[in-house]
Image: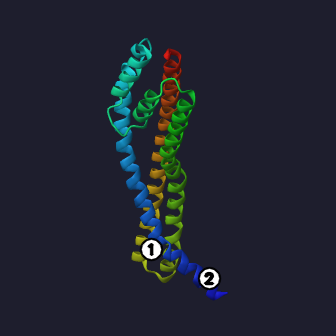
Amino acid sequence: MESLVHTLSWISTALQVPVVVAILYLLLRGVLALGDFYGRWSDRLRRTRAGDALAALPAHELLDQLARSAPRQADPLRQALAALGQAPADAAWHERVVTAFELAADRRLALFRTMTRIGPLLGLMGTLIPLGPALVALAGGDIAVLARKMEVAFATTVVGLVIGALGFLLHQASQRWALDDLSLLEFVSARLRASAP
């Protein structure tokens, strides 16, 4: 029985480094996603200001204006609008483009879902792993080791919760934007097919 306890303790201690690395990786991805989020938010702000005037334009002018209002070439909405313009009357092609856009939006949201679920879980693991050695240090009277282990425990908890909160907020906003963009694509698709000869 004692060997099993030592094995579990060794496995738990060995997991501390991968857990801390995973927390730092998710935090870095979250900070990068926050920067991308700000860029997309400023793009949307520009497009929203011109949104009501665009609805009255003819289909092809509407398509050109919307494509120009998405300034980044890698923007999935811009790519989808360009793809819709390739075959303005083909309903099957339009359905394929819209579905591909939905899949791309879901892939983008996957990172935020992962941050929301895994961040707090890693934070909890990062809290519990050093508590064993901290209790051993407490029993041995080594207050310095106890303090160091408790510092790691609390730091990983806080960072894990920050990752989860950041992922949740980014997911909520990005999901609304994806639905708005999907609605816009369906509107443009319907206008293009209606105006086709």
Neighbours of disc 2 within 10 Å: few (<14), some (14-19), many (20+): few
Which element carries disc 1, helix, strand or loop?
A: helix
- Where residue 128 sits, quadrant-wise, is bottom right
Tell me residue 45's x, y (percent): 37, 27
Secondary element at tag 2: helix
Query: In the image, is residue 140 above or below residue 67?
Result: below
Q: Which residue lies at the image location 44% right of the left edge and 71% below the top edge?
A: 17
Amino acid identity at mark 2: Val
| Quadrant where the N terminus is found in the figure | bottom right
Mark drawn on residue 146: 1
- Compared across the picture, whether 71 is left or right of 106 comes to left
Q: Nearer the viewer, residue 84 or 4?
A: 84
Q: Which mark is residue 25?
A: none
- In the rendered view, would you say 133 is above or below 42? below
Which residue sits at x=45%, y=51%?
Answer: 162
Q: Residues within 10 Å of mark 1 (few under 14, many from 20)?
A: many
Residue 5, label in figure: 2
Image coords of residue 113 (percent x, y): 53, 48
Question: Could you tell me which residue is drawn at 41 percent across and 31 percent down?
Answer: 82
Which percent across, then down, holds residue 102?
53, 38
Residue positioned most to the right: 1
